[in-house]
Amino acid sequence: MGTLLSRLFAGLRYRNYRLYWLGQLSSVLALNMEMAAQAWLVFLLTDSPLMLGVAGIVYAVPRVSLVLVGGAIADRADKRRIMVCTQSLLALAYLVLGLLILTERIMFWHVLVFAFNSGLMRSFDRPSRYALLPEMVPREEIANAVALGSSVWQACRLVGPGLAGLLIHWFGVGHTFIACFVSSAAAVALWAFIRTRPLIGQPEGGVWRNILAGLHFVRHNQLFYSLLGLTCFNSLFGMSYVILLPVFARTILEVDSRGFGLLQSFSGVGALIGTLIVAYLAQAGRRGWQVLVGSAIFGSLLMLFAYSSSFALSLGLIFVLGLFNQIYLTSINTILQLNLPNELRGRVLGLFGLTWDLMPLGGAISGTVAEFAGAPTAVAMGGFLVAALGLYGLARLPAVREIE
């Protein structure tokens, strides 16, 4: 048992990474509570599903459009300071929004300003978080550290929305944003004690030149454009089942909100276990095969899920879907971390960080298909495309297939 735990949590032996990991736990918990609380607040203020979409777009615009700028700055500046500064501004925004709600001065435009600020801060914060990792753990522990970091996202995805719901029920949405402030401030306090030395290799020239250099590097390197392409393709077509899950729950599986919640929970538990498997197998090698085979299996399972009419079978399938999807994405993150030049790390990993931000666009595509051909067809089509791309990679992408 001791050997199992030591392999599973190997990255936590390092002081800087422990501080980073605990701060990540607090920060990502705040993010997941924020998403649930903001959606609840918008609906309270407007009683409009359309305005929920508007708030999402306002968040996504700076998050997507400035990711390369954030990555270029992460490659030029102190990554820890960027994390501390952006998280401090987010904490302040939580506090201000919470006080506006508690004093009954809140208006819808306040929420839009908050959403824009949240997207803006994360366009700079996320690349720095990814790029800081090799400065905290030795190369041989990077794979384990990547998986442990992913496990935080999955655990908070399970706990955060539910915790926000309980806080809203017990204390109100204003106090929920105060809780986000406390959680985010805790991350700032932990990250303030991280002490690292920047790795050798800093980009030359201005920010715009650095952005072009990053795009040029990805475009002319098969390994990196293939991995980023696989990631974006998965977000656009594979992850659409998450957006359409309410349709499956209500009209196909014919379950109520409790059944819908179970589907989400089984997916989250599968994803969490997937990250822990990757953490345990950190030294196993053959990561290229893990990525491509994981993609093919994920897409195939998605096609099975699309046409399942049994709730029990769907629960089992969505559990395994979460598991293989996380193995697939965590393996890509690990390969990127282990093979990127230090001076390009922030820019390329910033693009990888768009994984979840492209999901709404994928949801819009699959939603359009579902409107005319049905949700099962839309999800099955996405699964087929993801599986086909994984099989294509096995046959035609040696740079990915042969990576260890």
Image (tube, rainbow, N blue to C red):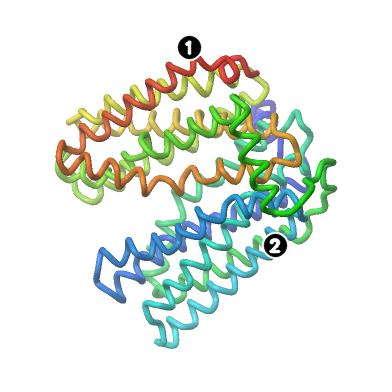
Residue found 33% across the figure and 28% down from its top: 383
Q: What element carries label 2?
A: helix
Q: Where is residue 252 in the image (x, y as percent from the top left)?
A: 16, 38
Q: Nearer the viewer, mark 1 or mark 2?
A: 1
Q: In this view, does 404 lie above or below 121?
A: above
Callout 2 amino acid? Val
- Residue 125 is tagged as none
Could you say which is closer to the camera, residue 385 or residue 24? 385
Q: In this view, does 16 lie above or below 118?
A: above
Q: Distance between the residues labelled 1 and 2?
A: 44 Å
Residue 15 falls left or right of residue 21: right
Residue 295 sits in quarter: top left
Residue 399 falls left or right of residue 48: right
Could you say which is closer to the camera, residue 228 or residue 222? 222
Residue linked to disc 2:
84
Callout 1 amino acid? Ala
Residue linked to disc 1:
395
Residue 367 sits in quarter: top left
Residue 150 falls left or right of residue 380: right
- The quarter of the rendered structure image containing the N terminus is top right
Please say if the residues under marks 1 and 2 sit with CB atoms less than 8 Å apart: no
Residue found 51% across the figure and 56% down from its top: 63
